Image (cartoon, rainbow, N blue to C red):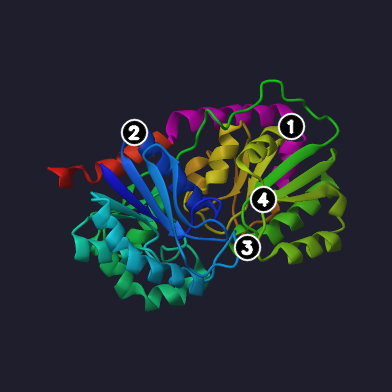
Amino acid sequence: MRLILVNYEYPPLGGGAGNATACIARALARQTHEVSVVTAAFGDLRGTEQECENLSVIRLPCRRARQDRSNYIEMLSYVIAAMRALPRIARERRADGLIVFFSLPCGPLGWLVRTRVGVPYVVSLRGGDVPGAETRVGMIHRVLAPLRRAVLRRARAVVASSAGLARLSEQADPIPVKVIPNGVDTKYFYPVTDKRVDTAQVRFLFAGRFQPQKNLFVMLDQFARAAAQSRKPLHLTLIGDGPQRGDLQAHVQTLGIADHVDWPGWLDKAALRGAYQRADVFLNPSLYEGMPNTVLEAMACGLPVIASRVIGNDELIEHNATGLLFDLDHPGDLMQAMVGLAEAQERCATLGAHARQRACERYSWDFAASRYASLFSNSMN
């Protein structure tokens, strides 16, 4: 089958949705589908690259100033470039189907190709494109509701990465949503068997964009409280970057915990895996999620996860079995969870082992890719 994946972000651009696009594309290619990814150019990343057998990446010229994020104008510039190029690409590559990530801004591109070329498309919802997931863009969702619903109605299928996200979408738009969870490469992300237990300190880890969704100021406040109360020294590493970095670093100075916090920036895949393997506990205090890749990667590396009780997190993490969940309305529970795990390393190890087992048993990119491909199988008859 010849499939095109459409997303304005693809590694090294962007975050979780770009990573999911890459993992699904590579899994489809391993399954011998002919896969093309149509994404945004950035710096020297432009034109067409044969990433591996059966997988090519086409980067379209558009406006983008930062590797880790893009604004609405930059997203629109990608959509305009793709409107010009995508129908031609679909014809030349004799595409059997498109997988379009985000109902908006990318969803209309699927509708365009279906109208002009007759190729069916699937919409993959990722979180912020679902009304109710991110309250600060509620007005935009209301204004664009007619366009979003038209895109979803004309799709061959609408897919969410979690059951909670699917329910949220169906509440906003009366269109059925299928669930295909994200996956994780458990052969690449794994715990080290000879991990040294550092009795001197407990190492907490966060990885992601430094933006309001991630709720990092609250995390830092509660980490400072935990560091003051714990009988063991605590250390926090924040991997990533984003618009809040400067303010977060200033907040750390104000809290007086600068000696307890590291800021390594973005890490490549191997270095990120090493960070998971060295850590003791992973933190994800997000205000909302689709299904966070970093949580899955941390679980695969044998880490217990302390996370907010929101859609996406609550499907990955079983409270008191693979990690701990806290309510956003009670941020002090995050502090208590940190202190509790810091002072019970055997419990940490048990939760982490169960987290690894769950990641191996329930989440696979190959399974996700085959599920996406199956959505187009009827169109081949």
The residue that disc 2 covers is: 31
Residues at discs 3 and 4 in contact (Cβ within 8 Å): no
- Image mark for residue 19: none
Residue type at numbered disc 1: Ala
| Type of amino acid at the residue the image marks with label 2 | Gln
Note whether 32 is above or below 178 in the view shown.
above
Element at label 4: loop
Instruction: Name the residue at 44% across, 49% down.
Output: 21
Q: Is residue 182 visible?
A: no
Characterize the magenta stretch by its predominant secondary structure: helix
How far is the residue under mark 3 from the one under mark 2? 36 Å
Q: Which residue is mark 1?
A: 344
Q: Name, please, the residue furthest toward the left.
A: 381
> At label 4, which amino acid type do we have?
Trp
User: Which circle's residue, 1 or 3, is located before the other in the chain?
Assistant: 3
Q: CA distance from mark 1 to mark 3?
A: 31 Å
Residue 312 location (% of width, % of height):
48, 49
Is 350 within the magenta? yes
For the residues labelled 2 and 4, the Cα–Cα distance comes to 30 Å
Mark 3 or 4: the one toward you = 4
Start and end of the magenta stretch? 336-364
Instruction: Spot the residue most to the top.
Output: 194
Earlier-in-chain disc, 2 versus 4? 2
> Which residue is pictured at 45% across the width and 60% down the height?
8
- What is the x, y in percent for residue 139? 45, 77
Viewer-side residue, 246 vs 75:
75
CA gap, disc 3 and disc 4: 14 Å
Give the residue number, with chain letter if any, for mark 4. 266
Sequence order check: which comes first, mark 4 or mark 1? 4
Which residue is labeled 3 in the image? 211
